[in-house]
Image (spheres, helix red, strand yellow):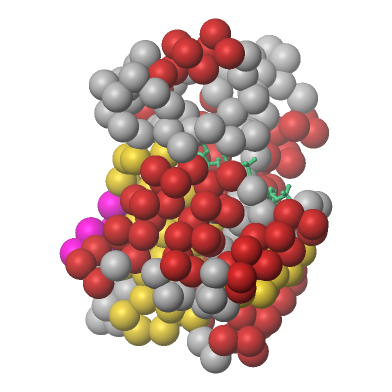
Amino acid sequence: MTGSSRGIGAATARRLARDGYAVTVNCLVNTDLAAQVVSDIKAAGGQATWLQADVADPAAVRALFDLTEETFGGIDVVISNAGIMNTATFAEFTDEAFDRMFATNAKGSFNVLREAARRTRDGGRIITIASTSIRARRATHGGYAATKAVQEIYAGCLAKELAGRRISVNALAPGPTNTDLLDVPPPLRAQAAQMTPYGRIGEPEDIANAIAGLCAAEGEWVNGQLVFANGGFF
Ligand SMILES: NC(=O)c1ccc[n+]([C@@H]2O[C@H](COP(=O)([O-])OP(=O)(O)OC[C@H]3O[C@@H](n4cnc5c(N)ncnc54)[C@H](OP(=O)(O)O)[C@@H]3O)[C@@H](O)[C@H]2O)c1
């Protein structure tokens, strides 16, 4: 589970551990938070380990998969979740912000899915995290949404490549969710909340629940899809 020291990833790691999975937690810089997620899972009776690894680095991603196989004996579920959001108008976007975001979100996810394709056991699940921003087409979200739109394509193509192995591959697109990544002032959060029939933005646990549903045995038939988990955000 990449990017699981905070936010959606941490909530999902905890949820999947409760569902009985042994989980590898991953971070980029917040090693203390990753270690805390692992401690919490172990304290609750689960199994977990963690590794600092930049998903933009193919060798680091291979090390993450190596650790998981060595520690737990195999890989059944891969969640490519690590991501960053840099927003700016086209006119103001810097090369540095654009390149780092593509390296993390688009290439990073590719690095993870490539290893997942090689190592996920038959009957497993692969999920890559997209975003509702690919439909919302908000000003300043052009670069970010582009890094998320590729996730739908990755999932559809990889699902076909893994034909015959009963591995379901999907892209899951959260809507606005209460994490550090949603770095917007309270009025904009309130506005986003009013854009769902539930009158609130998502919590990380809402997204973890949706991921857990796809990972469950009953989730098998959802395959090669882009699945929105956004409370009906419009
Ligand atoms: N929150 C939303 O509203 C929202 C909506 C739609 C989609 N999403 C997507 O959901 C995913 C999770 O977002 P979030 O809101 O939970 O974000 P978050 O709270 O900012 O957490 C991001 C996580 O990704 C890790 N990370 C960042 N860059 C990394 C890298 N290069 N290598 C490995 N790990 C890295 C971070 O590790 P450190 O703690 O070490 O920095 C952290 O664990 C992202 O792909 C995001 O685009 C979020």
> Would you identify the image quadrant in which residue 187 lies?
top right
Is the residue 229 above or below the residue 74 in the image?
A: above
* Left-right relation of 208 to 24: left
Is the residue 60 above or below the residue 120 in the image?
A: above
Is 23 inside the magenta-drawn segment?
no
Compare residues 21 and 157 and report the one nearer the observer: 21
Q: The N terminus appears in which quarter of the rendering?
A: bottom right
What residue is rendered at 42% in x and 39% in y? 174
Q: Residue 184 placed where, x, y %?
A: 61, 19
What residue is rendered at 51% in x and 87% in y? 74
Whether residue 129 is visible: yes
Is the residue 41 above or below the residue 100 in the image?
A: below
> Would you identify the image quadrant in which residue 25 lies?
bottom right
Compare residues 127 and 182 and report the one nearer the observer: 182
> What secondary structure prevails in the magenta region?
loop
Whether residue 90 is visible: no
Compare residues 194 and 44 and report the one nearer the observer: 44
What residue is rendered at 32% in x and 74% in y? 167
| Quadrant containing ligand 1 | top right
> Would you identify the image quadrant in which residue 102 lies?
top right
Q: The C terminus appears in which quarter of the rendering?
A: top left
Q: Which residues are magenta?
A: 221-225
Q: Residue 10 placed where, x, y %?
A: 58, 54
Q: Residue 172 placed where, x, y %?
A: 38, 48
